[in-house]
Amino acid sequence: MKKRSVSRFTKPTVKKSGAAEGWHGGADAEINLYARSLQKAALSLARALESQPGTRTPWDVCPIIWLYRQALELQLKALVGEGSNFLKSKTDPISLYRSHSLRWLAQVVCQVIKTVGWESDFACEGVSNLTEFNSLVNEVESLEPVSRAVHFANASGYGSVTQTFQKIDALEFARKLDALLELLEVTADALAATWEQRAEVAVDGDLGGGNNFGPTIH
């Protein structure tokens, strides 16, 4: 597959809409900074691990996976929080806050992207469509280290879990997740900007019908 830049979405500087009523209680900036810190720490660990191939154990990649998983959950929730405005039935903030299911969050993200008609723009390295997006998110969820460790302890076939982690290229995994996380972040910003523009147009009395989302994409 031909590699693409992270996203075709712009990344406007906007005040997040509905912050006080959001799942994060208005802490959108803090959530974003926390997600970036997790991502930065995961990348640093990936680079350190790949620089010492001779000392690596199958489980050494687990902290990298866990950190990226936490960052992914936060960025998915941020996008759902902004995109929920466009859905006929808004996502319940309490359910969004409490859920840790990446698969469920990805399903809602797909609903949002389809609703606003951004399927062709929602792409980055490793993700050219919503099917590949779901596949990557499902892969990250399936690699959840704690669940894998528990299953490994009860498994009769020794080595099944360790082999799964052993074959993961830490830097390749980091590259894919970095691209996905940036895609989610800029898409959430684009959704916030679009909703704000719609609100401004509505105030002016010029709101038209349909999904006129074009201005935030180039």
Image: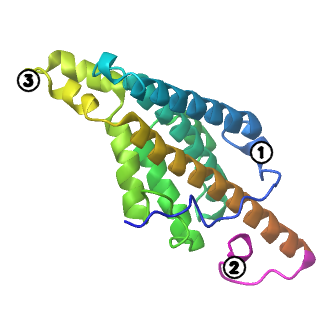
In the image, residue 24 lies at what x, y percent? Answer: 69, 37
Is 98 within the magenta?
no
Mark 2 falls on what kind of element?
Answer: loop
Residue at image location 69% in from the left, 77% down from the top: 214
What residue type is disc 2 on? Asn
As measured in the structure, the alpha-carbon distance from the residue carrying label 2 to the one carrying label 3 is 55 Å
Residue at image location 62% in from the left, 35% down from the top: 35
As measured in the structure, the alpha-carbon distance from the residue carrying label 1 to the one carrying label 3 is 49 Å
Which of the two residues, 174 or 116, is positioned nearer the viewer here? 174
What residue type is disc 1 on? Ala
Residue where numbered disc 2 is placed: 212
Residue where numbered disc 1 is placed: 19
Q: Which residues are magenta?
A: 204-218
Q: Which mark is residue 157?
A: 3
- Residue 49 figure quarter: top left
Q: Is residue 176 left or right of residue 25?
A: left
